[in-house]
Amino acid sequence: MPDILETAREAARAAGKVITGSRQGRVTRKASNDLVTEADILSQETIFRIIRSAFPGHAVMGEETWGNGKIPPDRSWIVDPLDGTNNYAHGIPHYCVSIGYVEGGVPRAGVVYDPVRKEMFWACHGSGAFLNGRPLCPSKAGSLRDAIVCFGFYYDRGALMRDTLAAVTRLLEANIRGLRRTGAAALDLCWVACGRFDAFFEYRLSPWDFAAGLVIAAEAGARVRSAAGAAPALAPGSIVAVAPGIADAFSDLVRWEPA
């Protein structure tokens, strides 16, 4: 696992340089409100090259070349080369590189790199979570009134949007301290891990969005589940990450199951 982490950190740093050192280039639309830039493609190519050089027998899957979405059962890597593309394309300095390592269909290690702040988050199953070498732990919030909550929207503007807004309304009615929406789920999970946010939820995320951040949040000590309360699966679905002291109260307010 040390070799896995070192390779992931090397790839994340190199990709971060690609992203911050180049202009966004051509912007195209994959779907409604879902953009891709040339930096996404160049970053993914850089990450793939480094991982395949170090581990030629491993599968490597990325957001920009996801294919049929079937994750190999053995050793594989799940990459989001630029999480927060909409932010990046609009000049908003909040985005990251996310690299998750999976064995037997279960995320075992993760690296998330914020090239703007030069912050490298990483974790390995059973070994804790770290930010630039410092151990992480979630916030000590003991009440929803103390909580800064982050959430995300899927690109769909239909039922999922309405369900998300309903949960936001319940949280505001519970008098949480504040609400944020940043547009980079991998960083949101890491910010729960280090206590900047007290909780995060989103009802539709893809594996590349959370494969790395899920490991980091869980290893830091946050409670990580689906919005239905189950262990999260490595498939498109919901994710809730929350500080232990408010986990039950928060999870009740954002509980959700797909129709």
Image (cartoon, grey):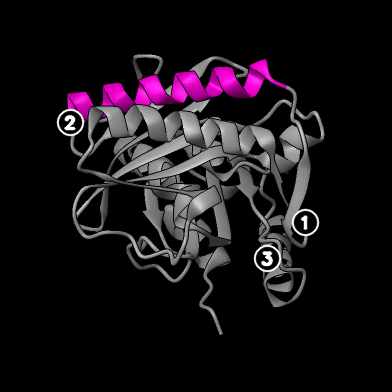
What residue is shown at x 43% (from left), y 31% (from top)? 47
Residue wearing tag 2: 1
- What's the distance in space between the residues labelled 2 and 1, CA to CA? 37 Å
Which residue type does callout 3 highlight? Thr
Q: Amino acid at mark 1?
A: Asn
Q: Nearer the viewer, residue 226 or 43?
A: 43
84 is within the stretch colored magenta: no
Distance from label 1 to label 3 (Cα)? 17 Å
Relative image position of residue 116 (x, y in whole percent)? 63, 18
| Residue depicted at x 61% and y 37% | 40
The quadrant the N terminus occupies is top left
Disc 1 residue crowd, few under 14, some 14–19, many 20+, Cα 10 Å: few
Q: Dots 2 and 1: beta carbons under 8 Å?
A: no
Return the residue found at the far bottom.
Answer: 259
Asked whether 188 or 39 is in front, the reply is 39
Residue at (68, 36) in percent of width and height? 38
Residue 37 figure quarter: top right
The residue at which mark 1 appears reads as 33
Disc on res. 164: 3
Above or below, 208 against 233 in this view is: above
Marks 3 and 2, how far apart at CA: 37 Å
